[in-house]
Amino acid sequence: MAALDNATNFQLDEAHIRLRNTVRDLAKKEISPLAKRMDMNQEFPSGLFQRLAQLGYAGTGIPPEYQGSFSDYLAVVLIGEELARVSASVPVALFPHAMLCAHNVYLSGTQSQKERYLPILASGKKWGAMALAEVSAGSDILSIRTKASKSKGGYVLKGAKTFVTNAPFAEIYLVFARTSAGRGPEGISAFILEKGYPGFKTGKVFDKMGMRGSPTGRIYLKNCEASEANLLGGTEGKGYEQLLAGMDAERVSWASIALGIAQASFENTMNYARRRKQFGKPIASFQMIQGAMADMAVTLQAARLLTYNAANLLDHGKQARIEASSAKLFSAEAAVKISGDAVQIYGGAGYTKDYAVERYFRDAKVLTVAAGSSEIQRLIIAHELKEHQEKAFGGHQ
Ligand SMILES: Cc1cc2nc3c(=O)[nH]c(=O)nc-3n(C[C@H](O)[C@H](O)[C@H](O)COP(=O)(O)OP(=O)(O)OC[C@H]3O[C@@H](n4cnc5c(N)ncnc54)[C@H](O)[C@@H]3O)c2cc1C
């Protein structure tokens, strides 16, 4: 069994262990051989989507009543972790489809939206994406400028979205736009748009440092026509609330990707340090290397416990804003630190493409930036702590 295997430090039930082993097997046999090529060529093989869909993973965020495979958030974490262990680009493409798009439609959509879209997304017939960020609105999501104006029988959307994961091939997009002027959250609405709608265009695809197997691009809405049935939940002005409803799950899913990268970096380094000899001894026998390995192990375990705990709270219907942000913040930073330490311990070899640790290092970095940067997670945690304190002490201390 691999060092620091996730079953060793958290109570997983039999179904979770079975799921973890199945995904691990798939990742090892079918994804691992593709990982390097996906990174080099900056492509997500279409056959891999079909395979993920065939095995039920396209329905990761969708419950069985809509033909998906969602059971709980801990299962989502195990899937993310095991896939990221061989190629982080795979869950980075899967989760915007399954969690950011489909799961949010499940959480906030009308009954007819769920019936129309969830089975198509669950079967992988169509791939999904979520488009919130704009060139001038990243961390400051309330500053989005994309407008949705009322028209006869529906809406006309004007604007552009950037950094949309899956943009080149996704066909169903959850798009956030302003339905009223001003900066308030009450002016934001979410729409389910399809690629073929008049005025909908995909654009530039970014040449990225890491997660190169997962395409990220722009979309343009040039008087894009949508009907009233495309308004998520059927009520205007609920977009921000709907975004927050799925945000903790999104953060936990991103934390799981960090765990996979950190686990792979740690395992590879343990093996390399035992094999690599300098001064007539394996470098693993040097105390400074042992100290670094111990720090990697402790950091990895802490990240995993934070992430599983946050997933577990969500699974019990508990409030988990601080815990989900803590998991995202700590795990993302842990993945950067652990993969960076892996490159260090590999020495010059770690700086070449002969070893996967350089990919892990490049892939890890985006986790502290996207889906709410580390700074934004700290702001959220600080804000929540203040709220808790005010509730507990009524502002008097
Ligand atoms: C590979 C990738 C995939 C992505 N996928 C998607 C997607 O599918 N859908 C989508 O909508 N978006 C997506 N994004 C966008 C992502 O969520 C944003 O990049 C992220 O929110 C940060 O916004 P920004 O890049 O504009 O940085 P900025 O907001 O410009 O931030 C720049 C820096 O300033 C810091 N900063 C900003 N505000 C504060 C503050 N108040 N206090 C302290 N520091 C602050 C940030 O932490 C950051 O370090 C993706 C991004 C990447 C890189």
Image (spheres, grey):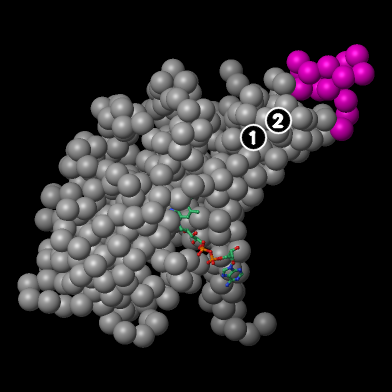
- Give SS at disc 1: helix
Q: Which residue is mark 1?
A: 358
On whether residue 217 falls in the magenta region, the answer is: no
In screen coordinates, is 233 left or right of 341? Answer: left
Which residue is painted at 43% across and 41% down in the image?
214
Which residue is painted at 50% across and 34% down in the image?
39
Residue 68: x percent and y percent? 24, 38
Q: In which quadrant of the rendered view does residue 31 lie?
A: top left
> Dot 1 surroundings within 10 Å: few (below 14), some, or many (20 or more)?
many
- Marks 2 and 1 in Cβ contact (< 8 Å): yes
Disc number placed over residue 350 in the picture, else none: 2
In screen coordinates, is 30 left or right of 275? Answer: left
In screen coordinates, is 308 left or right of 134? Answer: right
Q: In which quadrant of the rendered view does residue 61 lie?
A: top left
Amino acid carrying label 1: it is Glu
Compared with 191, 298 (above or below) is above
Residue at the left extreme? 153
Compared with 262, 8 (above or below) is above
- Which residues make up the magenta segment? 273-288
> Dot 2 surroundings within 10 Å: few (below 14), some, or many (20 or more)?
many
Residue 357: x percent and y percent? 64, 32
Which callout, 2 or 1, points at the residue further toward the start of the chain? 2
How far, Cα to Cα, is label 2 from label 1? Answer: 6 Å
Q: Is residue 290 visible?
A: yes
Which residue is painted at 24% across and 37% down in the image?
124
Residue 222: x percent and y percent? 24, 67
- Give SS at disc 2: helix
The quarter of the rendered structure image containing the C terminus is bottom right
In screen coordinates, is 34 left or right of 116? Answer: right
Q: Nearer the viewer, residue 14 or 96?
A: 96
On whether residue 283 falls in the magenta region, the answer is: yes
Q: In which quadrant of the rendered view does residue 5 lie?
A: top right
